[in-house]
Image (cartoon, rainbow, N blue to C red):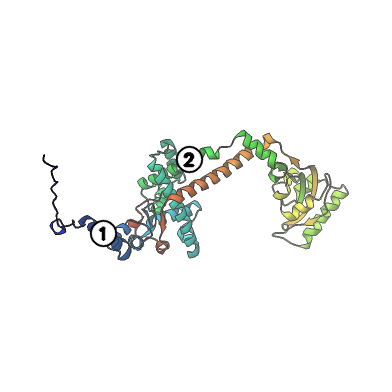
Amino acid sequence: MPGPKKRKTTTVSAAANPARFPWRALLYTVVIFYLVTDLYWCEGPLRQRIDQRKAFTKYSRQRALENGWVATVNNRPLTRGQLDQATAIYLHRRGKTPADISAAGLRIARRVALGQLIDDTLVAQYARAEEFQPDPESVRARIAAFEAQFADPADLAARREALGLSEAKLHALLADQVLVEQWIASRIAEAAAVSEDDLRAWFDENAATDPGAENPPLIRARHLFLSTVEEDTPEREAKIREMHGQLESDDADFETLAAAFSDDERTKHHGGDLGWFGVARMPRDFADVAFGLRSRQRSEPFRSSLGWHIVEVTDSRPAERLDFETLKPEIAAWLDTERRRYAVAVLLYRLKKVAVVELFPENFDHPVTSKSGTEEIAPSP
């Protein structure tokens, strides 16, 4: 009976089946070594290409100096020409031109204008990313309102030239202004809303202590006035004292003396009547005397910074607290303004927090001299 078959074994030597060389691992190592060397050690071609597209590198500063950029907002450059326009518009709103202010004042104006230009550019970027469209009728009204400031078309053309803008670019600038304003309004509408409960809460909390919730004391008075601005002689004092004596002895009445001798042309033919007024409306040296009198009391002759007076209080009203319905329009206007201002500040803070804004101070104070440098428009006039 045959036994079990023996398994045939084959012995293979190590020399006959060598291990495979780790080419893939070596390739990965070489690639990683190259990337580390290029990106972190030697600033090779790859690092340079990346840096040329990034902010806050020597390449971004080099581009700014070469192209006259004053800032970039999310990689969008703002040029010296745009800053020139924004500065001219900022000063125009205040009735001035760059030639009207000192060099130091102009530097300050350019920095304020740059801040506004950056904010407007950032808002416009977000609005356009959302495909937000301004109301066409509002744009037309803004253009019409701007042009209505100039009675003569030549004056309008001169203003456009001073701003470095063609008619089309001016209209685009005004449209961008409406775009920025309406997008902001749409984003803050809920946060800035003021309800009836808000108005009542403010009144309940503040009306008892806020000076604006009270009508101040008022008096109605009349006066005789001799000016010392052009003629300051002893005779002026003698005349006012003579009139006071006539009043005290009933030899003449107030209306007659005012019409004959008072230098206040506005009141002399109305018996010297000044109407109702509060202490803040009159010069201090006059109000101190007038408000120190009782109703129906007449002062002695006294001198103010303007001349000699005799004043007589004809009626008076004490201070009074105003009720909610009277104050509601003022409270609403104040709360609306404050909430909008705060909401805009919060919105801009949030936008800036995620934005990339790079400044290039070397270019701030070097306005463009050629008109070609002002071709790009600033976002907001």
Q: In the displayed image of the protein, which residue is found farthest to the left? A: 2
128 left or right of 261 in image: left
Decide which of 316, 48 is in the foreground and name it.
48
Question: Is label 2 in a helix, a strand or a loop?
Answer: helix
The kind of residue tagged 2 is: Arg
Horizontal side, residue 100 vs residue 328: left or right: left
- The x, y position of residue 306, in whole percent, is 72, 57
Q: Residue 225: in sight, yes or no?
A: no
Q: Quadrant of the N terminus?
A: top left
Q: Position of residue 150 (x, y in %)?
A: 45, 46
> Furthest residue to the right?
249
Q: Nearer the viewer, residue 241 or 131?
A: 131
Task: Tell whether label 1 touches label 2 (CB within 8 Å).
Answer: no
- Within 10 Å of disc 2 (Cα), the crowding (few <14, some 14-19, many 20+) is few
User: Is 153 in front, or is 101?
Assistant: 101
Q: Which residue is at 45% across, 41% downward?
A: 183
* Residue type for callout 1: Thr
Viewer-nearest of discs 2 and 1? 1
Chain-order first, disc 2 or disc 1: 1
Picture coordinates of residue 34 (x, y %)?
26, 61
Q: Give the total of numbered labels.
A: 2
Residue name at image x 48 percent, y 64 percent: 103
User: Cα distance, mark 2 to mark 1?
Assistant: 51 Å
Tell me the element at label 1: helix
Report which residue position mark 1 lands on: 29
Which residue appears farthest toward the bottom when viewing the image? 42
Compared to residue 77, the image places residue 150 above or below, namely above
Observer-nearest residue: 113 or 132?
132
State whether residue 174 is above or below residue 62. above
| Residue pointed to by mark 2 | 187
